[in-house]
Image (cartoon, rainbow, N blue to C red):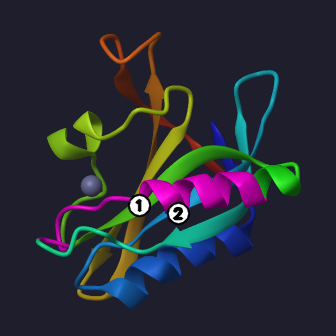
Amino acid sequence: MLKFTLRDYDAIRRHGEETYPHECCGILLGRFEDDGTRVVTSTARCGNTRTDSAHNRYNIDPRELVRIQREGRERGEDIVGFYHSHPDHPALWSETDFAEAHWIGCSYVITSVEKGKAAITNSFELAGMDEGDKKFCDEPVKME
Ligand SMILES: [Zn+2]
């Protein structure tokens, strides 16, 4: 399960509306609870480095990722997930999303943005033991 405050949930959906018709992407920071629940306590926007086809691909600059991870740790936050938008496409993961997902135990959140308005937001946990065994599992999103 992934828990959000309404503020953070709104922030990632708004980000998708702002970058429409291009994809947005960013990082979810927070904590892992003992029962496996991930709790988001802040979000960080990332620039989309895929300029060739930013409408259907996304990528986070590794240097940006390292900086956000370091700044999070200074506040006592871990990376608990990633988010991106699907402009005029369903909020379901693609083969590319799966191939590019490497953080096992983290959440991958996708928001569909239809004609510029954020529609459905879904989250998928990247489960498994390692890269060869990984799989996306639907997970509930809870607001608190
Ligand atoms: Zn995607």
Discs 2, 1 touching: Cβ within 8 Å:
yes
x and y percentages locating residue 99 in the rendered image = 24, 35
The reply to whether residue 94 is in sight is no
Q: Badge 1: how crowded within 10 Å, few (<14), some, or many (20+)? A: few
The image quadrant where one finds the C terminus is bottom right
- Which residue is rendered at x = 31% and y = 57% of the image? 91
Magenta stretch: includes residue 70: yes
Q: Amino acid at mark 2?
A: Glu
Left or right: residue 82 versus residue 90 is right
For the record, the magenta segment spans: 53-71
The image quadrant where one finds the N terminus is top right
x and y percentages locating residue 19 in the rendered image = 35, 85
* Disc 1 target residue: 61
Give the spatial CA distance, label 2 vs label 1: 5 Å
The answer to whether residue 43 is above or below residue 36 is: below
Secondary structure at numbered mark 2? helix
Left or right: residue 91 versus residue 128 is left
Magenta stretch: includes residue 59: yes
